[in-house]
Amino acid sequence: MAELISKEGNKVSFRVAVPAAEVNRAYDQVWAGLARDVRVPGFRPGKAPRKVLESRVGKGYVENEVRDRLLQVHYPQAARELKLSLVDARIEPEPLVSGQPFSFTVRGETYPEVTLGDWRAVQLTATAPEITDEVLNRTLSDLQERNATFQTVERPIEATDQVTIEELGEEGGSYPVYLDVAEPHVRDALIGKNVGDEVEITVPAHQHGDHEHPEHTVRVRVQSVQTKQLQPLDDEFARSLNFESLDRLRTDLRAELERRARQEGDAARREEFVNALVEGMQVEIPQALIDRRREAMLEEIQDDLGRQGVKWSEYENFMREQGKLDEFLSDLAKNAESRVKRDLALEKLAEDLGVQLSDAEFSNTMNALAQANGLTPQQLQRQLGPNGINAYYISLTREKALQQALATLNGQQVAGRQEAGAEQTAQAAEQESGQPQAEGEQAAEQRGE
């Protein structure tokens, strides 16, 4: 049971009491897990006494596991029960004793007060790209290019050839060059040359990764020249791609292109709507909220660099030497503010629409997420922690609200198009039958038609 203690501005605190029966159930679950997973010499699986198991895992382990399990379940439930959308929270658990109720206090910040504009009046203009015959033919040509073969020829190099060159010098090495996608300085140096020719390629100054490379010359020898052979667009080509005929290839390819186009259109409409939602929103955002998001984003960047073996201090020094650190930090702050605004707008949208997730719906989504990451639901909950679980729940409600709003707008626009289409059809029928349409003509004049 959750009890609100205080709420001043966006500061809130509440207390949660967990009944003794649920505490005991959590203890039983943890002990059962230990009995199943911990092997104790001299005891059959699941038969070792609890005292022996505790000596194997360490004193206090069971209490910590039970406490975490209870917080992971009851903190998000309490936030939903009190209808609180928490930005961040500090959890203060009280002592945990088997057979007794367990209580904890949460102190945190809610999102600031937000007022949305009339989002139902938003007119979405983004559409899916049209899949024309030209688009389909261009895609088929790309398939031809990707499945091209190369045949050795004895003639000067031409613009679409594949050329194998040997780099002369200490480092040396041979490698192929595809001239139709090669850099201009490479292509210009090689076209017209023959097998056995030695060629100097002048590489202009450029930046690669963290290094600035000055202009320099590379000397190479042409080892072989191969010409590109495109397969004809026929049934044999289609069968080489596991399609029964060229017509079937064209049909399936068009269907796939149209599917991707619909996805692109949906993504564009989604982005258009969220931008309109943010632009029409009224809110005073605490700077601390933006700062917290910026720090979290910076930590993500540092973690990503660490996984690549790059220390943040080294990367920071590099950007400072390049004169790009201030620009990086400025962009980070702008992105943090943008993300906060989007979150606030979507959170208010979910509130206005009364969007909620049932326990079963949330549990199924958590189970699917755990499975996708090769984890058990318990492992995922442990990784996320109480705050992470609550944040994930909030993100799901925002997504559900966004989908619901887009469906509403789509329905309105489809209805509008149907009404307009019906009017046009009626007018056309009247014209064909010779019936008078004075009202239609007057409407057309008013519209300037």
Image (cartoon, rainbow, N blue to C red):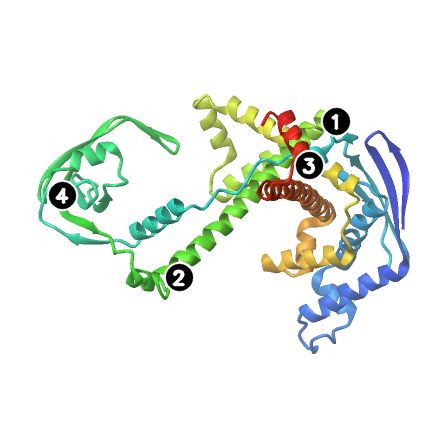
Nearer mark to the viewer, of 1 and 4:
1
Q: Earlier in the sequence, mark 1 or mark 2?
A: 2
**Label 4: few (<14), some or many (≥20) within 10 Å?**
many
Q: Which residue is mark 4?
A: 222
Type of residue at label 4? Val
Which residue is found at the position 75% from the left and 68% from the top?
32
- The x, y position of residue 212, in whole percent, is 34, 28
| Residue ID for mark 1 | 283
Secondary element type, mark 3: helix
Question: Residue 343, labelled with which disc?
Answer: 3
User: Mark 4 or mark 3, which is nearer the start of the sequence?
Assistant: 4
* Residue 297 image position (x, y, % from top left): 60, 35
Disc 3 versus disc 2: nearer the observer: 2
Q: Which amino acid, mark 1?
A: Val
* Viewer-side residue, 326 vs 442: 442
Asked if the residue at tag 4 contacts the one at tag 1, i.e. Cβ–Cβ closer than 8 Å, the answer is no
Say whether disc 1 or disc 4 marks the residue closer to the N-terminus.
4
**Which amino acid type corresponds to the residue marked 3 in the rendered image?**
Asp
Q: Is residue 24 above or below residue 398?
A: below
Whether residue 329 is visible, yes or no, is yes
Q: Is residue 31 above or below residue 226?
A: below
- Given the image, on which type of amino acid does mark 2 rest? Arg
Residue 379's disc number = none
